Image (spheres, grey):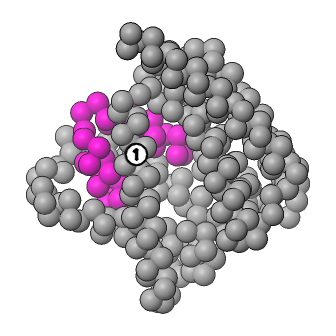
Amino acid sequence: MRALAQQLDPFQAQFLRYLFGLIVLLPLLWRHGITAYRPKNVGGQLVRGAFHTLGLCLWFAALPMIPLADMTAIGFTGPIFIMIGAYIFFKEPMRWERWLAAAIGFAGVVVVVGPKLSGSGGYYNLVMLASAPMFAASFLLTKGLTRYETTGVILVWQALTVTIFSLPLALLHWQAPTAGQWAGFLWCGVLGSLGHYFLTRSFRIADISSTQSVKFLDLVWASLIGWVVFADVPSQSTLIGGLVICASTVWIATRESRGHGRVRA
């Protein structure tokens, strides 16, 4: 998506990403019928789509302008908002391990992002930062919807609402994509839909707050892909912050697995 957003207008890239995310879901609609994907709460789906679209507008505006690792690290502020929201709205238990892991992970994010806020890309770093609470609101709404909507319904309606809400901005600076770009959007639609499916499934079977520390592993993948594909050499602060984040992730994952083991026993 970063490569495509560098070649086309970011809002057009946003629209096409979710349009193809909807297209790859059409076989499911064909197999099970449209009625199987009729939501019980249309209003909730629309509100969630609006929050997710707003977050995406900010995210895509900054996407082509900052390194992939930094973009991912800034997005790690989202789990803080999610954990607070989960405690307020869902009364999820906030054990000290989760707070500590989030605090350590956030400290790693500060190590990564702090030195860059004063640079030339500081404005886009702040734009990316502003997307985090919007995505947090979207994911909290997703958690609420999983109580009475299936994963498939949530997935289809996210693709549908974001596609519709993104279309007006996409038309402002539309240009015809090449065959390679069409293929890229199709591939992103497949990967994006799979990612959202697994994320929504995790919200259904676990506390949303307990899933957030795992997101810190995104920085490892973003750093590697950014280095291989875009020649974005991770800075020393990114590497140090990444080690801090990974340490907190491994620790909380171990604690959570032990806790679930005790519950099963």
Q: Residue at x 53, y 22 (%)?
A: 256
Instruction: Specify whether 136 is left or right of 120.
Output: left
Answer yes or no: is residue 41 visible. Answer: no
The boundaries of the magenta stretch are 133-161
Give the number of marks.
Answer: 1
Q: As displayed, is residue 48 above or below residue 231? A: above
Residue at x-position 43% and y-position 82%: 182
- Residue 171 picture quarter: bottom left
Q: Which residue matches tag 1? A: 198
Which residue type does callout 1 highlight? Phe
- Which image quarter is the C terminus in? top left
Quadrant of the image containing the N terminus: bottom right
- Vertical side of 128 occupied by 8: above or below: below
Residue 114 vertical position relative to residue 65 in the rendered view, above or below: above
Q: Is residue 243 left or right of residue 261?
A: right
- Percent x, y for residue 164? 35, 65
Is residue 38 magenta-colored? no
Q: Point out residue 188 in the picture as x, y percentages from the top left corner.
A: 46, 67
Q: Position of residue 79 (x, y in %)?
A: 59, 36
Residue at 39% of width from left, 55% of height from top?
A: 194
Q: Is residue 89 above or below residue 262?
A: below
Q: Is residue 181 visible?
A: yes
Q: Residue at the spot x=45%, y=11% of the render?
A: 262
Q: Nearer the viewer, residue 166 or 7?
A: 7
Q: Residues within 10 Å of mark 1 (few under 14, many from 20)?
A: few
- The image quarter containing residue 212 is top right
Helix, strand or loop status at disc 1 = helix
- In the rendered view, does 117 fall on the left or right side of 259? right
Horizontal and vertical percent for residue 72? 66, 52
Magenta part mainly helix, strand or loop? helix
Assess whether residue 136 is covered by the magenta stretch.
Answer: yes
